[in-house]
Amino acid sequence: MTVGLVAVLFVAAALVAAGAFAMVWRRDAVAALAGIPLMFGGAGVAFAGVARFSARAAAAGAPPTTRIVIGVSGPPLGQEAAVLFAVVALAAVAFGIALSVRAAITSSPDRETRR
Amino acid sequence: MDSPHAIGFYVSSALSVGGGIAVAFLGTRTRRALALLVAGVGVAGVDASLSAGFAAAVVLVSFAACAALLARPDLRAVEWATASGWRQAGSLSAALLFIALAYAAYRGAFAHVTFNGGELGTAAVGRLLFAHDTLATEAVGALVLVCLVTVTIAWRMRERGQR
């Protein structure tokens, strides 16, 4: 049993699609926000998979005159992207909740009667 | 990748995708938050089986925080444009997105190399985050700070309005 980059990208695609589905399916905007971390998580999985399996992919396609070092992976830029995506997902959810709280305030029936 | 890692990858994948679909379909807010947490455990497991242990830890914390934010019982539901046709078209678009991405992954020609970055890769990721891409890290940190301050102000305003 083994895992390749294609399997990782399939899982990433499924996560992104599940997040998009959750966002469009829920009528409640707060519930739809739960799709954001799924989509960012899927993107992060794809980046981590590329860092794991295809690091230095460009080196493999280099002209044959240059000496290619096989078996040395480059800096884990994909892992870095996954970390940043996770943090941005949290920020996006927090911002979305702030917007929805503000929308709930402005559409509150108490506020309407006060006006 | 050896067999235990591969089994961990497939189990985590099932958890993450199953949790993601459950997020879309479960009814109550608490259950959705729990499903999001399960999906987060799955995504973290996938990252960990891909030798990205540090990313896995950050993903787990991020999903847990998102679930905690979304599980608050005092959040009021905000309805948005909900024509049934648009929702179905959106769902169809999500399915098409999955098909397109899966097709691109299947048809792509990728070069494979041996990975020797270690299981966690904390030092290498730390060097990238705090030495190579410091500006990006600072920008994301500022973004998180602004968003958390915004949500705090919004909550304060609502509490003041309730009094």
Image: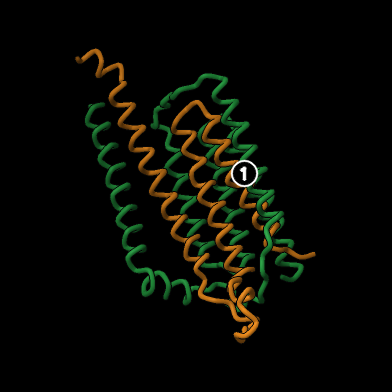
Vertical relation: B117 (above or below) A84: below
Task: From the viewer's side, name the closer residue of B156 and B89.
Answer: B89
Question: Which residue corresponds to mark 1?
Answer: B19
Which of the chains bears the disc numbered 1? B
What element does badge 1 sit on? helix
Quarter occupied by residue B117: bottom right
Residue A10 percent location from the top left of the image: 67, 52
- Which corner quadrant holds the C terminus of chain A? top left
Chain that appears green: B
Chain shown in orange: A
The residue at 62%/83% (across/down) is A68
| Furthest-top residue in this view | A113
Above or below, A107 relative to A33 = above
Q: Residue at x 71, y 63 (%)?
A: A4
Can you say whether B9 is above or below A32 in the image?
below
Relative to B17, residue A110 above or below? above
Q: Quadrant of residue B8?
A: bottom right
Q: Position of residue A3 (x, y in %)?
A: 72, 63
Looking at the image, residue A76 sits to the left or right of residue B156; the answer is: right
- Amino acid carrying label 1: it is Gly
Across and down, in percent, residue B46 comes to 62, 59
The colour scheme applied to this rendered structure is: by chain
Between B41 and B121, the residue placed more toward the observer is B121
The answer to whether residue A96 is left or right of residue B112 is left
Examine the image and state in which quarter residue B70 appears.
top left
Q: Residue at x 49, y 33 (%)?
A: A31
Question: Can residue B105 be seen by looking at this rendering?
Answer: yes
Give me the residue at 31% from left, 21% from top.
A107
